[in-house]
Image (cartoon, rainbow, N blue to C red):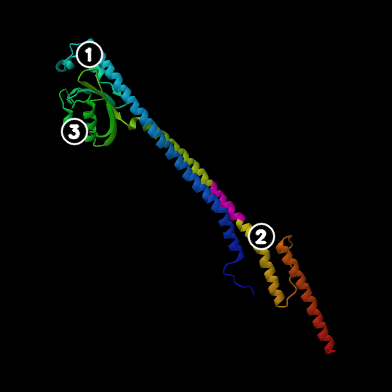
Amino acid sequence: MKRKIRFPLLAKMLIMTLFVSLIPLGMMSFMAYNGINYLTNNIVNVGTITLDDLGKKYIKEKAETVARQLEIYLKAHPEVKPENILNFSELKDIAIQKVGETGFTCLYDVNGIIFLHPQREMTKGFNLRALSKKFPIWWRIIEKSFKEPTGGEYLWKDPDGKIRKKYMYSVPVGDTPFRLGATTYIREFSSPLERIQSIIKTQSISILTIVFIIFALFFIFALVFSFLFARWVAKPITELTDIADRIALGDFSGTITVKRKDEIGMLSESLSRMQESLKVAIERLRAKKRRKRI
């Protein structure tokens, strides 16, 4: 009669083997996933800072270059006055230049009065002070530029309602009361990095997919191997247990087929010797009883 085992050795060994084999692989997969994410974020963060700094340097140099061009033009054309500045198209072409993709340069004076600006709402005579409450950080940059070259970041609300970060740098135009400001969106300089980030993330997903596929294949392999190994260990023990139960009931006809060169093999040989010894002993005892009856 076979005994019921709540938690057989086969199940124990299967679980233990899977546990030991899958934990290292799980840790490696987790470390690979976190490592790729950390590397991607680190590259993007460092790259963004670097590109932003280069962008600010470019805006500063653009403002200084245009200011020098204006200074040369004004010295060559002393007839240019604040009241007739719009009559000189060449001056307008110099003062209003493109900065990056969407940025521009503009001309204003130490009183905050606009003279040349690419946007229609900023017509000649518009006082920048009117925007000081709406954009206080921007106004502090403008106000500081009245006294010295200055630059800084600020938030600007676009016509579509979006608020985005911009950078502006303003410099004096020679000894005149004019100031030349250059500005554009900071994101323009880091946008190429965003495309690179997208590519890196796509590649990261591909790598992680391969890692998880390998993990799944290894899991299946570990599962099959664990089952076969556990069965290889547990099956002879179950067989020997059945033989031992039959011996306990006095049945010595069972044949021990387990032939191995390990501890289970030693157990098999010991059980075989015990079976043979008990069989001989019982046969002697029976023969002795038969002689007494005679």
Which image quadrant: the C terminus?
Answer: bottom right
Percent across and percent down for residue 70 are 25, 16
Q: Residue at x 18, y 16 (%)?
A: 85
- The residue beneath circle 3 is 132
Label 3 is placed on what type of residue?
Ser
Percent across and percent down for residue 259 are 74, 62
Which mark sits nearer the N-terminus, 1 or 3?
A: 1
The answer to whether residue 291 is above or below residue 140 is: below
Label 2 is placed on what type of residue?
Trp
| Magenta portion: prevailing SS class | helix
Q: Residue at x 55, y 51 (%)?
A: 24
Numbered circle sitting on residue 74: 1
Which mark sits nearer the N-terminus, 3 or 2?
A: 3
Q: State yes or no: residue 74 in magenta.
A: no
Total numbered labels: 3
Label 1 is placed on what type of residue?
Leu
